[in-house]
């Protein structure tokens, strides 16, 4: 393999940065050939979704979720498109996650395809992923005391200012789980906080923690903005059942 795309472990500084600002970006993790392969899987998934009746439903262990604006996401997309499940255990994703969690055992609970096709009105409002992981309930235990979870976003297309990029609020992770959806005062304050609009090339990987406040708006460009999202929990943290995968799959690195 071209050295540029070889497995890289994180430095101590990168891990510190992850916990300080709430996210890190790794450039050129996958080659353009590998991304082309993943793009073919996304195209298969999308053409399957086009043939459905617009109601959320499960096919071969993948949960096709439609919302008002169109196809919102495909949860556990690797059920339908095996190549995307294989990609989610590539060491170039698992190694940095394992460096952050300081665990060689990982519990993968998320393997999700996000499509923002031109003309569709798909957006994700300000949130922390800790909401989706059910922090504060008995479905989640913060085993490592640092969030116990890493979400990774692999750019399948370039992510630009025009096509609905992820937007992070740096350092917003510092106060843990904020129950944002029940905190309208804090939600209002986000407008005046510093933000980082992410621009990525296809093949770049963003990693962020469960407490990092983020959002992404509608794709206003005329080309797709697709990402493959994989999420890994510290062993023992999750007890929520997810569509397609139940309690998740155990991976060892
Ligand atoms: O596809 C997007 O931009 C949304 C990603 C997101 O909000 C998440 O991974 O939690």
Image: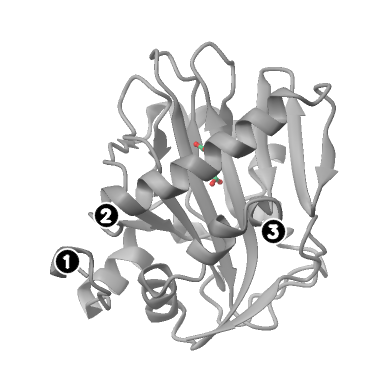
Q: Which residue is mark 1?
A: 2
Considering only vertical position in the picture, is 148 above or below 102? above
Disc 2 crowd rating (10 Å Cα; few below 14, some 14-19, many 20+) is some
Considering only vertical position in the picture, is 174 above or below 97? above
Q: How is the image coloured?
A: one colour
Q: Secondary structure at mark 1?
A: loop
Alpha-carbon span between mark 1 and mark 2: 9 Å
Horizontal relation, residue 142 to residue 220: left or right: right
Can residue 157 be seen here? The reply is: yes
Do the residues bearing badges 1 and 2 touch, measured as CB atoms within 8 Å?
yes
Q: Quadrant of residue 108?
A: bottom right
* Residue beneath the point at 39% across and 31% down: 165
Horizontal relation, residue 213 to residue 73: left or right: left
**Direction left: furthest residue:** 3
Residue 163 position within the rendered picture, expressed as x and y whole percent measured from the top left: 39, 23
Query: Which is in the foreground here, disc 1 or disc 3?
Result: 1
Q: Earlier in the sequence, mark 1 or mark 3?
A: 1
* Residue beneath the point at 75% across and 24% down: 51
Disc 1 crowd rating (10 Å Cα; few below 14, some 14-19, many 20+) is few
Horizontal relation, residue 97 to residue 121: left or right: left
Q: Earlier in the sequence, mark 1 or mark 2?
A: 1
* Residue beneath the point at 57% across and 73% down: 148
Residue 7 position within the rendered picture, expressed as x and y whole percent measured from the top left: 27, 74
Q: Which residue is mark 3?
A: 133
Can residue 186 be seen here? The reply is: no
Q: Earlier in the sequence, mark 2 or mark 3?
A: 2
Alpha-carbon span between mark 1 and mark 3: 36 Å
Q: Which residue is mark 2?
A: 31
Q: Secondary structure at mark 3?
A: helix
Considering only vertical position in the picture, is 13 above or below 176? below
Q: Quadrant of residue 222?
A: top left
């Amino acid at each position: 393999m071209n050295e540029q795309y070889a497995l890289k472990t994180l430095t101590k500084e990168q891990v510190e940065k992850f916990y300080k600002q709430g996210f890190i970006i790794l450039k050129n993790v996958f080659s353009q050939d590998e991304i082309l392969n993943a793009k073919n899987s996304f195209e298969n998934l999308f053409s399957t979704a086009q043939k459905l009746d617009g109601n959320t439903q499960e096919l071969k262990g993948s949960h096709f979720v439609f919302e008002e604006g169109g196809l919102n996401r495909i949860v556990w997309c690797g059920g339908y498109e095996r190549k995307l499940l294989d990609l989610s255990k590539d060491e170039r994703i698992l190694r940095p996650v394992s460096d952050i969690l300081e665990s060689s055992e990982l519990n993968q609970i998320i393997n999700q395809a996000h499509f923002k096709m031109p003309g569709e009105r798909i957006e994700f409002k300000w949130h922390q992923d800790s909401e989706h992981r059910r922090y504060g309930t008995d479905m989640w235990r913060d085993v490592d005391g640092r969030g116990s979870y890493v979400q990774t976003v692999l750019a399948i297309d370039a992510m630009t200012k025009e096509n609905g990029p992820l937007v992070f609020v740096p350092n917003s992770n510092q106060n843990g789980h904020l129950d944002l959806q029940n905190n309208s005062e804090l939600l209002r304050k986000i407008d005046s906080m510093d933000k980082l609009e992410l621009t990525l090339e296809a093949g770049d990987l963003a990693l962020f923690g469960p407490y990092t406040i983020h959002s992404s708006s509608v794709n206003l460009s005329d080309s797709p903005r697709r990402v493959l999202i994989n999420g890994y929990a510290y062993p023992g943290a999750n007890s929520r059942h997810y569509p397609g995968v139940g309690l998740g799959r155990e991976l060892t690195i």
